[in-house]
Image (cartoon, helix red, strand yellow):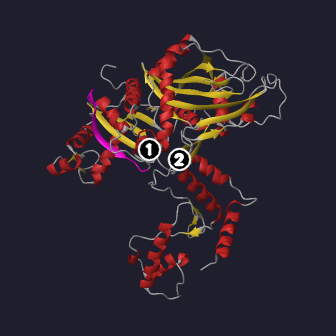
Amino acid sequence: MLSAYSQNSVLLSMMEGLVGDGVDLEPARKAFESTKGDFTAKFTAAVQARFAQLVEPELFIDVPERPEELRKDDLDALVRPAADGFLRSYPTKDELLRQADRIRQRQERRPPWVPRLDRHGKPIREPQTNSSDAEALPGRPLTVTALAELGKVTVLLPAADWERPELAMMPGGIGEWEAALYTVLGVTSEQGPAATVAIDAQANEALIPEGVRWWSTEPAQPLPAAQDPGVASELLATSTSLGGLSVTDNTHQDIETLAIALGSAGDWRYSARWLLDAWDSSMDVGTLATARAAIAGWAGEGRSGLIVYVYGGALHGTEGLIGVPGPLHSYLLCVSRSADGTDTVDTVRRAILSCPGEHWCHRGGCPMAEFPEADALLASIVAIGDVTGVADQDKGWAGETYQQLYGTRGVDDYSELVLDCLEAELSGDGWVELERATWEGGMEQSLLRRGAHCLAASYDPITRQLQLADGKPHLDGILDLLADDGVLTGDDDHATVDTSEQAIQQWGTDILTIAEDYLRGLINELRQLSAPIQGALLGLHPHADGTLSAPESTALAKEQLTVLIRTAGLFIGE
């Protein structure tokens, strides 16, 4: 047993190594501030982050469920590099199996923050606790340049597989806009709406033209929009163009479109609270401002798009508490897509609700919107944001419910699939599902028939893209499957389809019937879809599973799908 002196010396030495002079505590600080929950959770995360800097990487191996089925030599080669303790040169198979069991138990007990190496010495990605592989994503970076005024934005797609079949987002389209806005405003960052993120006062001040900035300052220290949500927000509030399109401010048409967007918005998602500690040079006093962004998809009156609301308040050194986030702007930004439901961005409209004034505003002052009709809706969005911040960090049923409905955690068995929603809209006009498939990587596809036509519908839950195409070319694949199964016999000139009870039981009447009709030349092209039509399903969380889980998501999806179906000419009489 150690003496009190010796034990205390050990503890003091440990403390010196953890928090002594010259120790890099930045990872611990970030872990503490970004972790949701109470003090215990935050403190534990900080300690783990500090220990992760000190521990050595460990070799991890994949121990099979039944190692006894391996040959002795293969088992020896597997466990020897990661042996637990001494392993003699010529062990028995029982000794090797005991080693495999000990290694498995040791690896299972290791916390996920301990760095690990594979048998070739290459780092293994840190596993996510309480998550499936799908939930451990997003993982694949995609560079988006749709908003040139903000610079390049790297978004993370919730899929790590670079080779998966994919419906790519249209370059510059509204799907890319949505991904970029979620990213630069911090809605999809690891820090949820309960967190507070300090934004860079000098970087925001650097946006002010030198001719407007009359006070003396240190040399400008600009930051790209992708690195500071305050910079991103201020550029969105003041740029005369976005995505190469002119931004209109506070016109009658702007207010009218914003009213439609607010009234038909889906589920709102929120950034962390931004904190700006700045200096009001005009009055030589400090200002502490807080703000946050809320983003939603909207769909109404045959149109759809995105809407952003940035709001907040401030403590001014002389004026006290005020209901606007000066020196930041408060505003509504509405992006409308093309009337045909595809991803072409049509208009960008904005309403400035508060401006910090000509001496701080990056364009020398903004025209203010008169939009009192929106006050009740905006107050509701603010109130929901307050609840969101609490629910997001809750460790009980409220946090779980919030994540299922609005976040990224898991797949809800009761969530409606996008293709289910599409088929429900089409079924009233006589379209019948023939086949449904999900490809490796998550791509979902449905083949439908109405009379002499086939429709192929594809949905990519990663990019949120839906594509409608002529389904006739897909029938050759069905014939190949029937031939492989012996249901289609004969040569190309005299092929016949087996319609026996056994074949019907295995393949279904609809598949066998369309195969026969296709062979007899009774299936025609959907000429209006000779070039597929594609559009993004807006308003779904870009890092979730792509299903319609949030309360407003189904209604929002139906509005968007209806427009796309009508554009494709799939409704009777249209």
Q: What residue type is labelled 1?
A: Gly
Q: Where is residue 547 drawn, in percent x and y? A: 40, 40
Assign a secondary structure to mark 2.
Answer: loop
Q: Name the residue under label 2.
A: 36
Residue drawn 62% across and 78% down? 2
456 vs 331: above or below: below
Q: Where is residue 4 drawn, in percent x and y? A: 64, 74
Q: Name the residue under label 1.
A: 399
Location of the N terminus by quadrant is bottom right
Residue 150 visible? The answer is no
Callout 2–callout 1 Cβ contact below 8 Å: yes
Number of the label disc, if any, that sits on residue 327? none
Q: Please say whether residue 375 is one of the residues in the magenta stretch.
A: no
Give the extent of the magenta segment.
427-440
Q: Please say whether residue 437 is one of the residues in the magenta stretch.
A: yes
Location of the C terminus by quadrant is top left
Residue drawn 54% across and 53% down? 40
Residue drawn 46% across and 43% down? 544
145 vs 339: above or below: below
- Mark 1: few/some/many CA within 10 Å (<14, 14-19, 20+): some
**Foreground of the two, 500 or 522:** 500
